[in-house]
Amino acid sequence: MTACEIRAFIDQLPKAELHLHVEGTLEPDLKLKLAQRNHIDIGQTTVEEVRKTYNFHDLPSFLSVYYPAMEVLQTEQDFYDLAYAYLQKAAANTVRHVEMFFDPQAHTSRGISFATVITGLHKAVVDAQDLGVDAALVMCFLRDYSKESARQTLAEAMPYKDWIVGVGLDSDEHNNPPLKFARQFEDAQAAGLHITAHCDVDQKDSIEHIKQALEIMGVERIDHGTNIVEDPDLVDFAVKQGIGITSCPPARTDTSPKMKGEAILELLSKGAKICVNSDDPAYFGGYINDNYYALASQFNLSKEQIAQLARNSFEVSWIPSLQKAHYQSQIDTYLSKDK
Ligand code: HPA
Ligand code: ZN
């Protein structure tokens, strides 16, 4: 396949996005617009200047740019605009279903109410239907905050339970193992929510964290999670249990220059339910199709392998099985037309 053919194939392939932080879709131009609208001096006055601040080399340095950028998000309308701008891009990337992470504590900790955040995001989720994108929200706990803060956040979320499909765990993983939040995950599950957790790339305790998340907490997916290849027993467990692995190839290319491509391919060949996502596209330089393309072109993926990544994305999503079957048949149709 030529580069053009691969790109065209990916561009129209139906897919789901399961690892996407809505705050990570804050493009420099929107950041500037919101700063002006809310009369906030962010220290830059042009899009180019803002873009230059999106500069980091690992997870902690990324987070130290990422959280301060959120200060421009103040009103329900701001959260709506942020999410809707992403959902338009999702539609253009033939994303049919998306489960979007949001970080309430990154906002409530600076005085923005939970209601403001979730109402704005939810309105965008509703309006996304008109774009042909089925969207849902996944609430993340910040793992570098306390258990008590997670407990309070879950309590605040309860009145809005119907607007949330699951809970996740993100932010700085160093010395913040999944087990720290075992109780809050149990409570979330008891409330009928799905569970997933970041097991970020090449962390000090990556394998131990993956083990805890899968074997003790019983998460349905691991986000990033590609270090699992280092433990064949865990891979075997993940394959048997149909655990989702939501990789984000271009994230952390600073520390993993080959975007964990070999690990992704190994997991795919072993039948693990691994998929491709964009994580924080405004920061990592590309939306989901760019990420499929980066992986496919660098590692010479076949159409079948690319399609399998998309099939996996629907398979491990949190939609009803009838809807999954519908999307899988869209992929079948797409492949048969392509022949
Ligand atoms: N890892 C941890 N925390 C995050 C990420 C991530 O990939 N993106 C946004 N917050
Ligand atoms: Zn992430």
Image (tube, helix red, strand yellow):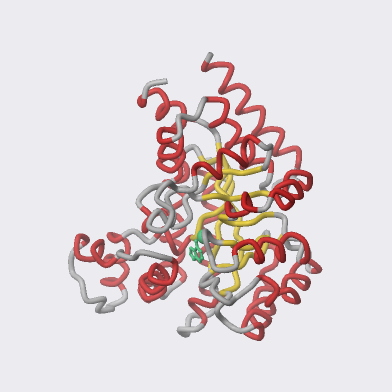
Q: Who's the residue at 65% across and 66% down the image?
A: 209
**Please, is residue 269 above or below residue 115 in the view?**
above
As drawn, the residue found furthest toward the top would be 339
Tell me: 186 left or right of 232.
Answer: right
Give the quadrant of the N terminus. Answer: top left
Looking at the picture, how far across and down is residue 72, in whole percent?
Answer: 35, 73
Residue 35 vertical position relative to residue 308 in the rendered view, above or below: below
Q: Position of residue 191 (x, y in %)?
A: 78, 68
Residue 163 relative to residue 79: left or right: right
Q: Position of residue 212 (x, y in %)?
A: 72, 66
At x 54% / y 16%, what residue is drawn? 337
The number of numbered badges drawn on the structure is 0
State the residue in front, 130 or 322.
322
Position of 285 relative to 315 (above/below): below
Q: Quadrant of residue 147?
A: bottom right
**With 99 as the anchor, is 55 left or right in this view?**
left
Residue 231 percent across, percent down from the top left: 67, 53
Quadrant of res 312: top right
Depth check: give the residue in front, 137 or 316: 316
Front residue of this view, candidates 12 and 55: 55
Q: Residue at x 19, y 60 (%)?
A: 48
> Observer-nearest residue: 18 or 38?
18
